[in-house]
Image (spheres, grey):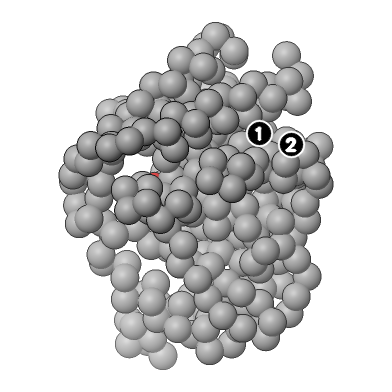
Amino acid sequence: MELKEIAEKMQEVARGAGRLITEAKHPEVFVKEGHANFVTSMDLASQKYIIEGLAGLLPGANFFAEESEQNRLKPGYNWIIDPIDGTTNYMLGYKHSCISIGLVQDGRGVAGVVYNPYLEEMYVGIENQGAFLNGQPIHAANRGMEDAVILFGTATYYQELADLTFAAAKAVFDRCADVRRSGSAALDICYTACGKCDAYFEIRIQPWDYAAASVVAREAGCAVTGLQGSDIRYDNPVGVLTGNPAICREIYRIVDEQAARLKGER
Ligand code: IPD
């Protein structure tokens, strides 16, 4: 099956999951391990819906999904799924969350679909075929640092990373136009892909949060790397930096400087 056809099916499933979560009346909230780490009954329902919708599309493909017990990247095809990225936003009715479905083949992101059901915005990236928002091609912005709006994230349960994250965010804020922390990494990355914002960074993030959006961003011409400029792998939580390549280089330097400063080296 052609990647384009697979991406169409991914969009259909993401749209269905989007309907499911936005129509739900009173989702139950459960507490996961770690500080302020939540899951709702609709994360679980959405994940089940997505897995059932994709099963059989690529026989033998592995499922790697946020709400599963055992997650491991395997050789061949892997579906990497976040059934609701922005769970805290979802619980609060903040209406900035999405469904994220990535397809990784032998460690390479080949297709990604990120759907914001509130705005009906469908971001799609297909290897070597480009990135799209509701069917229209999208590209990274080309603003300089002074005019840039930069997004950053941090998971509430990685409290040990808060000092570095907020020190880096402050140092970035001092040099750019403005910063944001939205609560959905997948949407943040897609916002860099379509030029609504200029770059995004997070010190440590899970593969299901970045897999799909990384393909959208890469295909839109963004740099998509680890925080040291390394290639993105999809097997472990890593630092992620996406956006206009020149700004990404600057952010890398800033994070590095702040890490050294906090360690007392500079
Ligand atoms: C979280 C969001 C947040 C990011 C965290 C993620 P979740 O995902 O993407 O923006 O900063 O690292 O854990 O828990 O809402 O799926």
Q: Are marks 2 and 1 in contact (CB under 8 Å)?
A: yes
Examine the rendered structure and indicate whether residue 74 appears above or below residue 176: above
Amino acid, disc 1: Ala
Q: Where is residue 31 in the image (x, y as percent from the top left)?
A: 18, 44
Residue 133 in view of the camera: yes
Q: Residue at x 66, y 33 (%)?
A: 111
Q: Is residue 72 left or right of residue 210?
A: left
Image quarter of the C terminus:
bottom left
Q: Is residue 192 left or right of residue 51?
A: right
The reply to whether the residue tagged 1 has its Cβ within 8 angstroms of ligand 1 is: no
Q: Nearer the viewer, residue 217 or 105?
A: 217
Q: Position of residue 229 (x, y in %)?
A: 59, 62
Disc ID at residue 38: none
Residue, disc 1? 111
Q: Which residue is drawn at 52% across and 83% down?
A: 173
Tell me the CA gap for discs 2 and 1: 6 Å
Neighbor class of circle 2 (other Cα within 10 Å; few <14, some 14-19, many 20+) is some
Examine the rendered structure and indicate whether residue 254 appears above or below residue 161: below
Q: Which residue is drawn at 57% across and 72% down?
A: 150
Quarter of the view holding residue 101: top right
Image quarter of the N terminus:
top right
Element type where label 2 sits in the image: loop
Q: Nearer the viewer, residue 61 or 119?
A: 119
Q: Which residue is drawn at 75% across and 66% down?
A: 141
Residue 253 in view of the camera: no
Q: Where is residue 64 in the image (x, y as percent from the top left)?
A: 43, 29
Examine the rendered structure and indicate whether residue 182 appears above or below residue 190: below
Sequence-wise, the earlier of marks 2 and 1 is 1
Disc ID at residue 127: 2
The reply to whether the residue tagged 2 has its Cβ within 8 angstroms of ligand 1 is: no
